């Protein structure tokens, strides 16, 4: 798949991850609104000249895509783009669309085609960083109550958490040689054209460390797979981001089809954003429909998350950021589109520069990988439809297992109930009963939210849920 462009996007020194702002649909200038497909010009950080995402209607036959490419070649010859910059970029199979560089007159012709659902101007997507302090997030998600002297440095968890689960980190890449990943980090794809297979920024490595690293990770046995959609300089285009989502969804679907014995599912994390993008929201929702479990950052503008993408993708888990003091972080977006909160202020994790490097940064970018790690953790310890409380009758016999306590204690505790909405497990030797059909993305999302600690946070923002992720290792 060819990439289209190398973008300009600059890092700013602030909190990490910022999804998108919203603008309305506009009919193309000088055209009757009902005669043409919508033209989306929403952006928060700027647009990319002559670059567009074209989305076809859902019922359009795949052969029409090739007809479009033929049409575009002919149209370009009659209305060439300056400097001969015409190109087809990504082809989005699940989204049923493509990206490319076209002249304004060609875009007008595309908008007139009956099979076109909408055309979206490509835009800049951004990450942000950085703030120094100490780690605390893992301890918080394994205790119901506010952290105190005895719990501040204790992460209680199932040692097998994350095993058999792949997590696609759609970001700046991953320092896959970092010692904390213990050989469980892999390179998946690099979407920006002419970029290199490495994380030259650090943001993606930090997210991956929160998900699955030995010391800083929620799901310490999971694999992390780099899907680089932002360049090493911190730049990225929406078209590359959509391409990264498509790559991850396709790779996960192919692995699931191989029915490997120990594979328990795939999760994706996306801690980035730009402006409101129907194309990105639709791509994320399609990935979830295909079987991917998805966590996304709510954004860092202290505004309604529904005005940002991918935060507005309804089928993903949209995550706001909380603080050590159990408050909504001052920067975190809020509102109806936020599903849950997770630690996001002053988070210590892996970094670039060496195979032992660390850094502390803040943002909803850090909250989302806590949640992606939690999804991977839950998938690994019990991949079953019984996560859905509506079908408790399908609950198989469970084996009660020890949970480890990390960081400052060697104590082992037994889980008293797998989930607070399920009956207590029956201890039986020597093995767990056969697991039924794998849990679906909607079921796991529902389980995550029902497991979450209620009313733990202050000032969550208008219409936000007062929910903080919790792994139920202690029940306390």
Image (spheres, rainbow, N blue to C red):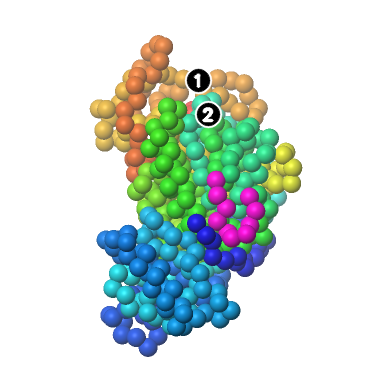
Q: In the rendered structure, which disc, 1 or 2, sits on the residue that comes first in sequence?
A: 2
The secondary structure making up most of the magenta span is: loop
Residue at which label 2 appears: 157
Quadrant of residue 115 within the rendered picture: bottom left
Q: Decide which of 345, 81 is in the foreground and name it.
A: 81
Outermost residue toward the top? 429
Element on which disc 1 rests: strand
Element on which disc 2 rests: strand
Disc 1 from disc 2: Cα separation: 9 Å
Q: Is residue 450 above or below residue 150?
A: below
- Which residues, given as a range, are shown in magenta? 188-197
Residue 139: x, y in percent? 58, 35
Q: Is residue 27 above or below residue 211?
A: below
Residue 131: x, y in percent? 68, 53
Residue at which label 1 appears: 402
- In the rendered image, is residue 360 in sight? yes
Asked if residue 114 is among those painted magenta in the image, a careful observer would answer no
Q: Is residue 444 left or right of residue 303?
A: left
Outermost residue toward the bottom? 30
- Name the residue rendered at 57%, 37% in the picture: 212
Mark 2 crowdedness (10 Å alpha carbons): few <14, some 14-19, many ≥20: many
Residue 465: x, y in percent? 41, 51
- Name the residue rendered at 36%, 76% in the picture: 111
Q: Are marks 1 and 2 in contact (CB under 8 Å)?
A: no
């Amino acid at each position: 798949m060819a990439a289209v462009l190398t973008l300009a996007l600059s890092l700013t020194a602030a909190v990490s991850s910022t999804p998108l702002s919203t603008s309305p649909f506009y009919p193309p200038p000088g055209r009757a609104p009902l005669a043409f497909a919508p033209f989306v010009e929403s952006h928060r950080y700027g647009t990319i000249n002559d670059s567009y995402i074209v989305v076809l209607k859902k019922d359009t036959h795949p052969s029409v895509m090739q007809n479009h490419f033929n049409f575009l070649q002919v149209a370009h010859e009659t209305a060439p783009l300056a400097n001969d910059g015409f190109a087809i970029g990504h082809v989005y199979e699940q989204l049923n669309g493509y990206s490319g560089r076209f002249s304004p007159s060609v875009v007008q012709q595309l908008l007139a085609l009956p099979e076109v659902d909408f055309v979206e101007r490509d835009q800049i997507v951004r990450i942000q960083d950085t703030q120094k302090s100490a780690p605390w997030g893992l301890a918080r998600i394994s205790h119901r109550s506010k952290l105190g002297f005895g719990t501040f440095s204790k992460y209680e968890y199932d040692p097998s958490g994350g095993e058999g689960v792949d997590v696609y980190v759609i970001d700046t890449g991953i320092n896959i040689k970092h010692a904390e990943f213990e050989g469980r980090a892999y390179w998946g794809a690099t979407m920006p054209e002419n970029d290199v297979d490495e994380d030259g920024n650090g943001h993606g490595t930090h997210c991956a460390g929160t998900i699955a690293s030995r010391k800083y990770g929620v799901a310490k046995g999971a694999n992390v797979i780099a899907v680089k959609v932002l360049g090493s300089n911190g730049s990225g285009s929406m078209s590359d981001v959509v391409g990264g989502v498509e790559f991850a969804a396709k790779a996960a679907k192919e692995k699931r089809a191989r029915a490997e014995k120990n594979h328990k599912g795939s999760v994706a994390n996306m801690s980035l954003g730009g402006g409101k993008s129907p194309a990105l929201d639709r791509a994320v929702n399609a990935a979830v429909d295909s079987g991917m479990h998805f966590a996304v950052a709510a954004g860092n503008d202290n505004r309604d998350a529904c005005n940002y993408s991918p935060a507005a993708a309804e089928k993903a888990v949209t995550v706001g950021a909380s603080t050590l003091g159990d408050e909504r972080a001052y920067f975190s977006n809020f509102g109806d589109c936020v599903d849950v909160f997770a630690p996001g202020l002053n988070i210590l994790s892996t970094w670039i520069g060496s195979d032992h490097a660390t850094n502390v940064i803040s943002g909803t970018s850090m909250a989302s990988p806590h949640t992606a790690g939690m999804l991977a953790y839950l998938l690994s310890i019990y991949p079953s439809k019984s996560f859905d409380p509506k079908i408790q009758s399908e609950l198989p016999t469970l084996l009660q297992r020890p949970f480890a306590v990390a960081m400052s204690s060697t104590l082992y505790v037994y889980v008293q109930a797998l989930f607070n909405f399920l009956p207590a497990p029956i201890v039986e030797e020597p093995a767990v009963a056969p697991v039924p059909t794998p849990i679906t993305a909607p079921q796991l999302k529902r389980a995550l939210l029902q497991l979450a600690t209620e009313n733990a946070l202050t000032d969550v923002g208008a219409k936000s849920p007062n929910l903080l992720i919790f792994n139920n290792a202690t029940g306390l």
